[in-house]
Amino acid sequence: MKRAAAILILLAGCEPFEPLPEEAMPSIRVVAVLPFADQTGGSAFDADEFANILASELVRAGNIRVIRPAQIRAAGEEISTAADAVRIGRRVRADAVLACAITDYDPYDPPRVAIAAQFFRVTAGERSSQDLDRVLQSGSWRRGPLAMSRDGAAHAMIAFEHVYDSREKGTRRELRRYVEGRAETEGEILAVQSRYLQFVSNQMIRRMLAYGS
């Protein structure tokens, strides 16, 4: 239960999100990370790179086994709905499936990346009609990368959309903390896409550890 709650905090990032009751969360040991969708409209963003970075950071953070996007893509199935995600999750024997879409990206210093995410358990939970309606009506779920049906809502765990903008004071404050004790500077992280995306992933993980302590 503690591991499952920790992963949810990892994914939550920031408001708005609408989690279902914590007592309904199962133990999560295997997470399938779907290939990230690029909704930026033709930017130079490497969605596959970000998906793999997040997968690696998830492994380091929680001793979770991760099924990576390349393995999901090799299955050769189109994934456009929550039901598709759950089906592929069962096929690869995952406990949960993470779907993400990159909605905005500016690579120039200071960089900015916006992400919308949905997290589904493979096993459907017992949900009241009120809970299902709340998921279906939630703006976070409607704006997510995968279409949601009533059946899909039974697998819903959490959804969020957040902008990681290094122009913002809060993000820069966290970046300063991140580089403490490291052999690199804020400027070096901001100048390299992969390092900034690792920092973003680290921020999610830090939230998880703070919750679990």
Image (tube, helix red, strand yellow):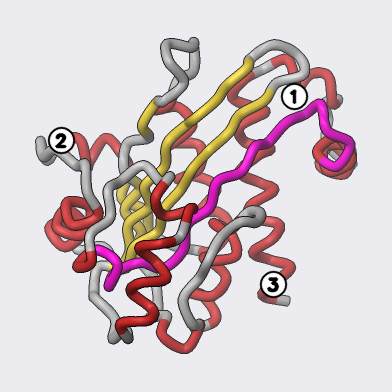
Q: Which residue is mark 2?
A: 74
Q: Nearer the viewer, mark 2 or mark 3?
A: 3
Q: Which residue is mark 1?
A: 189
**Badge 3 vs badge 1, beta-carbon distance below 8 Å:** no
| Label 2 crowd bin: few (<14), some (14–19), many (20+), radius 10 Å | few
Which is nearer the N-term, disc 2 or disc 3? 2
- Relative to the observer, which residue lies in front, 60 or 91? 91
Say what secondary structure mark 3 lies in. Answer: helix
Q: Secondary structure at mark 2?
A: helix
On the image, the x and y values in percent for residue 143 come to 43, 45
Q: Residue at x 26, y 35 (%)?
A: 70
Is 20 situated left or right of 99 in this image? right
Location of residue 128 (image quadrant): bottom left
Viewer-closest of 92 and 150: 150
Name the residue: 89% across, 36% down: 169
- Point out the stretch of residues depicted in magenta: 152-170
Apparent side of residue 58 relative to residue 31 in the rendered image (left or right): right
Q: Quadrant of residue 138?
A: bottom left
